[in-house]
Image (cartoon, grey):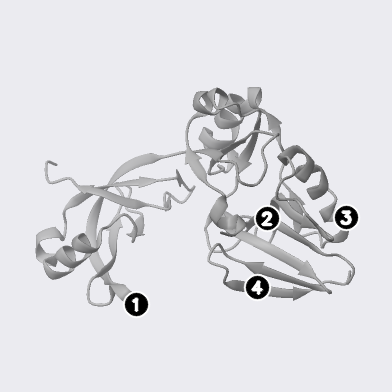
């Protein structure tokens, strides 16, 4: 079992995190989770599935470490000025010849803060706060429409090693959309629904591709006339200034409306 498999995430709220002994909170960035392997003058970015999606040279050929972060790519939130193309680091799994697997997070974080001194200015370490500040962070940086909202909060115990559970709270909003059309899926979803094209009450067009079971994808694709023009409920992580939704997922049809 590798380190990625050993790391587990559990959804909770602020009170639940406190009851689990969490004493640290961080803002949750909305990008691509990435493991950055740095050695011999190269930086290689890997996804959770161990697929390398980016490779770039580094002038410092002596630096060797494994860093974990959110790479700002592939989401609308990540395209905002000051974020696009950047990598926000939140953990360090090795430094030089030393593995940090059994090292408490407080000490891994201290090592992590050394990394930007050796890296391009596209790298930054996310800030950590005391758990007592969680409610204020949630109000000012997650819920507030003027904050260019973060995805949520991450809670940690500073004494935990890499095998410990990491807790998180994501903002969820619900909204009813109206089905305008259907997009065929690709790969294993060929010949069934890939996404529903829909609009909000304000007329913003949104493609909803998540939240469907395989059975629902076949049923909707084979019976499009039954669903065209019908309202349905989605859950999303936030609303952008454009009125579009972040990560909308299908919940249910609202034939009662």
252 vs 4, nearest the viewer: 4
Give the answer, above or below, for where 7 lies relative to 228.
Answer: above
Answer few, some or many: residues within 10 Å of disc 1's Cα (few below 14, many 20 plus, some between 14 and 19): few
Regarding residue 56, the answer to whether it shows in the image is yes
Q: Are marks 2 and 1 in contact (CB under 8 Å)?
A: no
**First-in-chain label (4 vs 1):** 4
- Element class at badge 3: helix
Tell me the distance, in whole angstroms, between the alpha carbons under discs 4 and 3. Answer: 21 Å
Query: Which quadrant of the structure image shows residue 3?
Result: bottom right
204 sits to left or right of 193: right
Residue 167 sits above or below residue 242 on the image? above
- Disc nearest the viewer among 4 and 2: 2
Q: Residues within 10 Å of mark 2 (few under 14, many from 20)?
A: many
Question: Is there any visible trace of residue 81 in the rendered image?
Answer: no
Q: Badge 3 is on which residue?
A: 117
SS of the residue at dot 2?
A: strand
Q: Nearer the viewer, residue 169 or 179?
A: 169
Q: Nearer the viewer, mark 2 or mark 3?
A: 2
SS assignment at label 4: strand
> Which class describes the residues within 10 Å of circle 3: few (<14), some (14-19), or many (20+)?
few
Residue 68, numbered circle: 2
Query: Are circles 4 and 3 on residues that touch, CB within 8 Å?
Result: no
Q: Which of marks 1 and 3 is nearer the N terminus?
A: 3
Location of the C terminus by quadrant is top left
| CA distance for labels 2 and 3 | 16 Å
Q: How far apart are marks 2 and 1 (CA)?
A: 30 Å
Residue placed most toward the observer, 101 or 222? 101
Q: Earlier in the sequence, mark 2 or mark 3?
A: 2
**CB of mark 1 within 8 Å of CB of mark 3?**
no
Q: Mark 4 points at which residue?
A: 54
Residue at which label 1 appears:
187
């Amino acid at each position: 079992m590798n380190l990625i498999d050993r790391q587990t995430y559990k959804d909770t709220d602020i009170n639940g995190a406190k009851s689990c002994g969490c004493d640290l909170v961080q803002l949750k960035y909305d990008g691509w989770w990435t493991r950055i392997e740095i050695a011999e003058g190269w930086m290689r970015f890997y996804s959770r599935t161990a697929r390398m999606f980016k490779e770039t040279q580094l002038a410092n050929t002596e630096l060797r470490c494994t860093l974990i972060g959110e790479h700002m790519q592939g989401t609308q939130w990540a395209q905002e000025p000051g974020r696009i193309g950047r990598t926000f680091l939140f953990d360090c799994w090795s430094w030089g010849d030393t593995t940090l697997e059994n090292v408490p997070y407080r000490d891994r974080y201290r090592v992590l803060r050394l990394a930007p001194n050796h890296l391009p200015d596209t790298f930054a370490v996310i800030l950590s706060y005391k758990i007592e500040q969680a409610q204020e962070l949630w109000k000012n940086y997650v819920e507030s429409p003027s904050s260019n909202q973060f995805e949520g909060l991450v809670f940690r115990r500073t004494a935990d090693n890499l095998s410990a559970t990491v807790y998180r709270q994501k903002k969820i909003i619900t909204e009813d959309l109206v089905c305008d059309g259907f997009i065929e899926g690709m790969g294993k979803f060929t010949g069934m629904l890939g996404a529903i094209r829909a609009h909000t009450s304000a007329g913003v067009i949104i493609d909803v591709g998540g939240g469907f079971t395989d059975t629902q994808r076949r049923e909707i694709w084979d019976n499009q006339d039954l669903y065209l023009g019908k309202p349905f409920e989605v859950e999303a992580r936030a609303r952008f200034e454009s009125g579009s939704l972040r990560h909308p997922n299908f919940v249910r049809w609202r034939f009662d409306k």
